[in-house]
Amino acid sequence: MPETNSIVDIRATVVQIRRISTAVTIITLDCPAIAVTAKPGNFVNVKVNDTTLPLLRRPFSIHNVRGSLIDIMVKSIGPGTTLFCDRAPGSTVMVLGPLGNSFDIAGKEFDTAILLSGGIGTAPMLFLEKTLAAKGKKVINLIGGQSKEDILAGELSNCRFATDDGSAGFRGNVVELLHSELAALKKEGRPKVFACGPNAMLKAVARYCHEQQLAAEVSLESVMGCGIGICYGCSVEVKSPDGGLRTILLCREGPVIDAKLLAV
Ligand SMILES: Cc1cc2nc3c(=O)[nH]c(=O)nc-3n(C[C@H](O)[C@H](O)[C@H](O)COP(=O)(O)OP(=O)(O)OC[C@H]3O[C@@H](n4cnc5c(N)ncnc54)[C@H](O)[C@@H]3O)c2cc1C
């Protein structure tokens, strides 16, 4: 979890808007105070306009950090995301962050990082890949979608794709792709999986990694209000050590959790 005193709420200028598909836009914000302390897996909570509609901020993963700039990859699915993607360069938004915990990449227990993502879950992977590469870790991206239009590989390297309709790469889901690649990946060194995508996909990832005794972390999604543990909007149930279930606030104890904590 980031130091709470490193969290700032700042008015950030929209520097650039790049539409990369019909529904997905990369928004670049000038946020020096957030860029300097951000870690892969962290997110920001953005007030997408200055009116009360929508009232609540919207959470987004940090897609990339470039000096004082942060990139956010946004899929338009409703009013908040559409308003955000329609912001003009030069306009400003309030940005709270960096929030949440981060992927655990410090350990020496793995040599190869398998970055496994589905749909807009690919958003945090570029920042994660760059940080892992700077630490000398080998990285492979396994990216899934319903069809090739859902694959958001962008600047990621060493990518393999899985699509349900077979329009790009492997025909099947991304967990099946992991299964088909795993033996070869294990020969290259000890793997660890870092996953982000729809929660149903993450449960399947957690189940598979549990069966294969693979170290894995998953970045979960939930509807979220404040992003700082006040509203309790992002309560999710995870496994507790006694085998039962316990509730965590995803904005503070997540969004990244050990895959073992997902009820499998
Ligand atoms: C930690 C975190 C990181 C995120 N990172 C990104 C990101 O990098 N890029 C991105 O595009 N989106 C991301 N999201 C999801 C994003 O916050 C939502 O898509 C956004 O809040 C929707 O706002 P809206 O007003 O457009 O749609 P709304 O009208 O609020 O929602 C539209 C529909 O989507 C559902 N929905 C809303 N939020 C979520 C959610 N979090 N999970 C599942 N369903 C939801 C609603 O129930 C509704 O059915 C992230 C969410 C979390 C919790």
Image (cartoon, grey):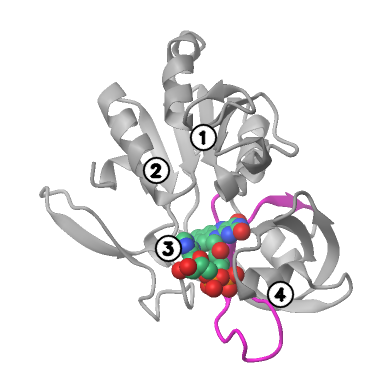
Separation of marks 1 and 3 at Cα, in angstroms? 19 Å
Q: Which residue is mark 1?
A: 116
* Mark 4 and mark 1: Cα distance apart in space: 29 Å
Q: Which residue is mark 2?
A: 202
Q: Are marks 2 and 1 in contact (CB under 8 Å)?
A: no
- SS class, disc 2: helix
For disc 3, the neighbor class at 10 Å (few under 14, some 14 to 19, many from 20) is some
Q: Is residue 21 left or right of residue 227?
A: right
Sequence-first disc among 2 and 3:
2
**For the residue marked with disc 3, what is the amino acid?**
Ser
Classify mark 4 as within 8 Å of ligand 1 or not, answering yes or no: yes
Most extreme residue toward the front, as rendered?
Answer: 165
Quarter of the image that includes the N terminus: bottom left
Q: Quadrant of residue 233?
A: bottom left
Task: Report the residue marked by disc 3.
Answer: 222
Give how far apart the Cα atoms at labels 2 and 1 are. Answer: 9 Å
Mark 4 and 1 residues: CB-CB less than 8 Å, in contact? no
From the image, tell me which residue sits under label 4.
83
